[in-house]
């Protein structure tokens, strides 16, 4: 049997809830900013006033009309070290294979966390990261004692008002080439890689199974399988899995069924 022995050495919260009553929404396509205030019927005027005040305030660390430019010196220092040394990692791979062969598990997502010392400005670091790698799901979360900087290209889950669920797992990555011929060669190498295709298909099966726990019978479909998408620095092999949430299930049931994401 497989036992859960992972130590929570970082002691980070599993969930963080934010009550946001005002926000600025950026439409990058139209170049437009909308100020949104949350309020109830009896305080609609107050909500509108809050939204207007939020729209009038300058963004932190951003001068009006300015565009961020990287300096020659990067904010983040080099020298990240993995918390899992190479010897321990190789032993973990052997143990994972043994558990798979014994039928204890279907697959293992064996990852390594890396750490480095950083005493700079996390907001500036995020903006540099965003400039270098403008990922679709980039995010900056200031949670007080914890700051989260995300540079993810991957959609874990989306849920529409009418119950449509979508997950877009990624398995398979190649760096972008320095010129069109090498770019095409890298894309072709990813598209024809048996290893990456097998891993992507395995994750698709896992996501289908997860969504099938809470979606209507027969509604889980794969409209896109192993599609190659290009990003600023890499090619990714992406699949799309969709379903319709059952009427007796909600977003928390969906999270419980699908978390953590297999990819």
Image: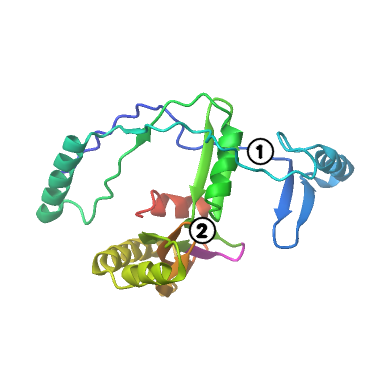
Dot 2 corresponds to which residue? 232
Q: Earlier in the sequence, mark 2 or mark 1?
A: 1
- Residue at 40%, 50% (x, y): give it: 259
Compared with 51, 122 (above or below) is: above
Compared with 217, 250 (above or below) is: above
Looking at the image, residue 107 sits to the left or right of residue 38; the answer is: left
Residue 174 or 263: which is nearer the viewer? 174
- Residue at 56%, 53% (x, y): give it: 134
Q: Residues within 10 Å of mark 2 (few under 14, many from 20)?
A: few
Quarter of the figure that contains the N terminus: top left
Residue 177 or 194: which is nearer the viewer? 177
Looking at the image, residue 142 sits to the left or right of residue 39; the answer is: left
Question: Any mark on residue 19, and which?
Answer: 1
- Circle 1 SS class: loop
Looking at the image, residue 87 sits to the left or right of residue 39; the answer is: left
The answer to whether the residue labelled 2 contacts the one labelled 1, judged by CB atoms less than 8 Å apart, is no
Mark 2 vs mark 1, foreground winner is 2
Residues shaded magenta: 161-166
């Amino acid at each position: 049997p497989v036992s859960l022995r992972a130590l929570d050495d970082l002691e980070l919260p599993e969930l963080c809830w934010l009550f946001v009553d005002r926000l600025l929404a950026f439409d990058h396509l139209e170049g437009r900013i909308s100020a949104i205030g949350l309020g109830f019927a009896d305080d609609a005027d107050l909500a509108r006033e809050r939204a207007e005040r939020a729209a009038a305030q300058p963004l932190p660390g951003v001068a009006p009309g300015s565009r961020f430019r990287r300096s020659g010196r990067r904010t983040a220092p080099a020298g990240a070290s993995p918390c899992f040394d190479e010897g321990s990692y190789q032993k973990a791979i052997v143990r994972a294979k043994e558990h798979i062969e014994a039928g204890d598990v279907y697959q293992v997502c064996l990852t390594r966390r890396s750490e480095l010392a950083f005493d700079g400005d996390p907001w500036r670091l995020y903006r540099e990261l965003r400039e270098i790698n403008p990922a679709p799901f980039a995010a900056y979360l200031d949670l007080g004692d914890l700051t989260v900087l995300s540079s993810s290209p991957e959609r874990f889950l989306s849920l529409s008002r009418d119950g449509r669920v979508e997950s877009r797992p990624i398995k398979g990555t190649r760096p972008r080439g320095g010129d069109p011929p090498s770019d095409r060669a890298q894309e072709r190498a990813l598209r024809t890689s048996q290893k990456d295709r097998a891993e992507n298909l395995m994750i698709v099966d896992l996501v289908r199974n997860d969504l099938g726990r809470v979606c209507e019978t027969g509604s889980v479909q794969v409209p896109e399988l192993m599609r190659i998408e290009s990003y600023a620095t890499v090619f990714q092999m992406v699949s799309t899995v969709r379903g319709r949430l059952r009427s007796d299930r909600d977003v928390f049931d969906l999270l419980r069924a699908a978390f953590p994401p297999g990819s």
